[in-house]
Image (cartoon, coloured by chain):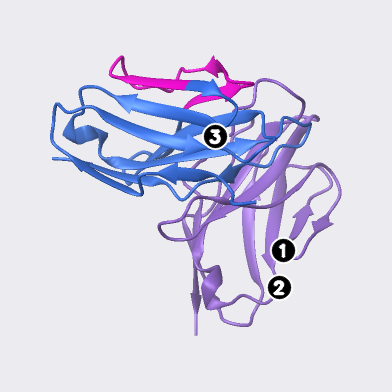
Chain colours: A blue, B purple
């Protein structure tokens, strides 16, 4: 299995532009998570899905952020419009919803908003 | 989920055992202890988990005290590649309502 796949690996954009981050979870996993990591705030859970349905988006910072999961093998995190303070590493993770959960993380997307 | 307390950083000599402590004094009976690590610029990696008993796998051992208020992750023969941030997480078991929250973790430096 290829693991959780995220794209792009790096994204550089200008303030005000729309940014779309992509994630392909491990096949068969029914939970998908989006995290953001910065030096100041560490790893923050933004939103997670179960069977393609958003369960908890309380970590999404503001309305500029949106996430979708149109099917079991694809999810997007969109920022529109982007701001410099959105610069961070964004990780996607997936898991199987069993009693004991192990998260499998992708390699992350390094986002720089200039 | 119970809060955890970890030292911000630790050093370990290569080839020696690395013992990483974690306090979780408010843990409840149905909460598991998980350990993840994050090597620089990579996504976090699951290491091990436990409920009551000590656990061992190919990566590490987990020792949980009898009262479950603290635990220790043991890397028996640390290598330079074990230099990473190690996260101790306590989270309830059971399906639904999954929220794995990462704290600041312990930055382990393995030195030659």
- Letter of the chain that mark 1 sits on in the rendering: B
- Letter of the chain that mark 3 sits on in the rendering: B
Q: Quadrant of the N terminus of chain B?
A: top right
Q: Residue at x 51, y 30 (%)?
A: A74
Q: Residue at x 76, y 65 (%)?
A: B58
Is the residue at mark 2 from the same chain as the one at mark 1?
A: yes
Q: How far apart are the two marked residues, 1 and 3, measured between alpha carbons? A: 21 Å
Q: Is residue A97 left or right of residue A112?
A: right
Circle on res. B76: 2
Q: Are marks 3 and 2 in contact (CB under 8 Å)?
A: no
Residue B94 image-quadrant placement: top right
Circle on res. B60: 1
The residue wearing badge 3 is: B101
Give the secondary structure at mark 1: loop
Can the viewer see residue B24 in this picture? yes
- The magenta stretch spans residue A55: yes
Magenta part of the chain: A46-68
Give the secondary structure at mark 2: loop
Residue A43 is situated, as x and y percent measured from the top left of the image, at 44, 40
Q: Nearer the viewer, residue B25 or A17?
A: A17
Give the secondary structure at mark 3: loop
Q: Is residue B42 left or right of residue A93?
A: left
Q: Residues within 10 Å of mark 1 (few under 14, many from 20)?
A: some
- The magenta stretch spans residue A67: yes
């Amino acid at each position: 299995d290829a693991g959780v796949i995220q794209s792009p690996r790096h994204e550089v954009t200008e303030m005000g532009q729309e940014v779309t981050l992509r994630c392909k979870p491990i096949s068969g996993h029914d939970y998908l998570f989006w995290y953001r990591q910065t030096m100041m705030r560490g790893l923050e859970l933004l939103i997670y899905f179960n069977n393609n349905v958003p369960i908890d988006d309380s970590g999404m910072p503001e309305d500029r952020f949106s996430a979708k999961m149109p099917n079991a093998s694809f999810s997007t995190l969109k920022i529109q419009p982007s701001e410099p303070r959105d610069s961070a590493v964004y990780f996607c993770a997936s898991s199987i919803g069993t009693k004991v959960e192990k998260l499998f993380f992708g390699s992350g997307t390094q986002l720089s908003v200039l | 989920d119970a809060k955890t307390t970890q030292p911000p950083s630790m050093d370990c000599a290569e080839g020696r055992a690395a013992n990483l402590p974690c306090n979780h004094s408010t843990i409840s009976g149905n909460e598991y202890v998980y350990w993840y690590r994050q090597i620089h610029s990579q996504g976090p990696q699951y290491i091990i988990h436990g409920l009551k008993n000590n656990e061992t796998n190919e990566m590490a051992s987990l020792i949980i005290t009898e009262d479950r208020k603290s635990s220790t992750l043991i890397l028996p023969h640390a290598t330079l590649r074990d230099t990473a941030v190690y996260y101790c997480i306590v989270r309830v078991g059971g399906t639904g309502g999954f929220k794995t929250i990462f704290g600041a973790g312990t930055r382990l430096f393995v030195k030659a």
